[in-house]
Image (spheres, rainbow, N blue to C red):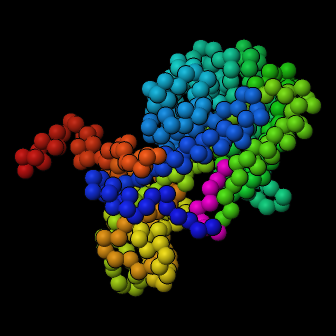
Amino acid sequence: MKKEPFVTKGQLDEIVKTYPTPFHLYDEKGIRANAKAVKEAFAWNQGFKEYFAVKATPNPFLINILKEYGCGCDCSSMTELMLADALHFSGEDIMFSSNATPASEFQFANSIGAIINLDDFTHIDFLEKTIGHIPETISCRYNPGGVFKISNSIMDNPGDAKYGFTTEQLFEGFKVLKEKGAKHFGIHAFLASNTVTNEYYPTLAKTLFEVAVKLKEETGADIRFINLSGGIGIPYRPDQEPNDIYAIGEGVRKVYEEVLVPAGMGDVAIYTELGRFMMGPYGCLVTTAIHEKHTHKEYIGCDACAVNLMRPAMYGAYHHITVMGKENDVCDHKYDITGSLCENNDKFAIDRMLPKIDIGDLLVLHDTGAHGFSMGYNYNGKLKSAEILLKEDGTAQLIRRAETPEDYFATFDCFDILKDMKRG
Ligand SMILES: *Cc1c(COP(=O)(O)O)cnc(C)c1O
């Protein structure tokens, strides 16, 4: 499928008059349409709830849009919990799925009434010691080990992942939690990441539903929800077929009716913790070509770098690039598109065929709406960019200002560096 930006060149030319590149731009219309589709796809399930994985895009303006569609927050750290709390998400609208969890985070999660999703058997005792009791509602993260397959193709390798209880630990854990006062239970698993197939959720659901039935039989636990977590992917590459969330919802419904309903568990709620699927396609990184370099290869140097988008450097991830205004030109130039870090993996694309790029051209890096800005860092003293929302009416709203040197130096407050710099 041809990948087209959600923003026009005309709109961008206007936006850059006020907000200099680089910045992340988000598409309100796309976010809303997708959130509505997710809600509809699972409307067959009474208790369905999507807990947006805050780590994907921790921006209050964007999270508030999702809130309108009934989404909660899935948090993994203290600051993410604080953000959800500040946005007035109430108790059960917050899922706390963390690992190697500090005591202070369990304490805070408990104090705001979040649902705690335990990552490990030993966390049962740790949590009890930390908060003085076991909450009435508790969830456990399951890791069946081995490899995760869909019709013989290996999707991911849970046996190698640090997360979750083994099958034995899960059964033992439910018994222990029940003895310690837990009344309502949830089961969670995240077994494959960025899956671009409608089969992932239904396959995962089958595994979890079967375990849930056994857990209920063997431990008598009252299982209230099954959390399919994240993992539904997006087509980063033009040749990938996008997931169909309606087909996914129907696939899960089919297994639900096959496995849970006959076991008398037709009232179990389905939860999800999608991050990438909720936001990925509805964000892009906008950057300007500021240099061209002709050495052993042809390079285009941008004003954005890996600090703004780490996925290519970290995973070798593909992000499609559109040269604005040259959408229909032939891609007859082979470029490495680079940032300015003193680090050779700071390349957004390697040997990418693109139209001829001129200095000053605006480049749009697609699909940066999840795990894009949020993975940013400050290497080389680079500052984080602004985030801007392209609203449904076509206007732009600044939803996070760009970092300034003052922000960067703020943690050196004991040295008063800024005062000295201004004097100098
Ligand atoms: C990262 C994460 C998610 C979101 O994953 P996506 O691939 O962005 O959907 C959900 N749940 C947990 C526990 C995670 O760590």
Residue at x 53%, y 20% (from the top left corner): 112
Front residue of 325/243: it is: 325
Front residue of 378/167: it is: 378
Q: Is residue 90 above or below residue 77?
A: above
Give how far across and how far down residue 409 sits, in percent: 25, 44
Residue at x 66%, y 42% (from the top left corner): 38
Is residue 275 something that shows in the picture?
no
Q: Is residue 134 above or below residue 161?
A: above
Q: Quadrant of residue 176?
A: top right
Residue found farthest to the right: 262
Residue at x 67%, y 50% (from the top left corner): 232
Residue range corresponding to the magenta coloring: 232-239
Residue at x 30%, y 47% (from the top left corner): 403
Front residue of 128/200: it is: 200
Is residue 402 something that shows in the picture?
yes
Q: Quadrant of the N terminus?
A: bottom right
Give how far across and how far down residue 380 sits, in percent: 32, 57
Main SS, magenta region, reads: loop
Q: Quadrant of residue 263?
A: top right
Task: Please indicate whether residue 38 sits to the left or right of residue 352 in the image.
Answer: right
Front residue of 145/93: it is: 93
Residue found farthest to the left: 423
Give how far across and how far down residue 393 sits, in percent: 43, 46
Give how far across and how far down residue 283 sits, in percent: 48, 52
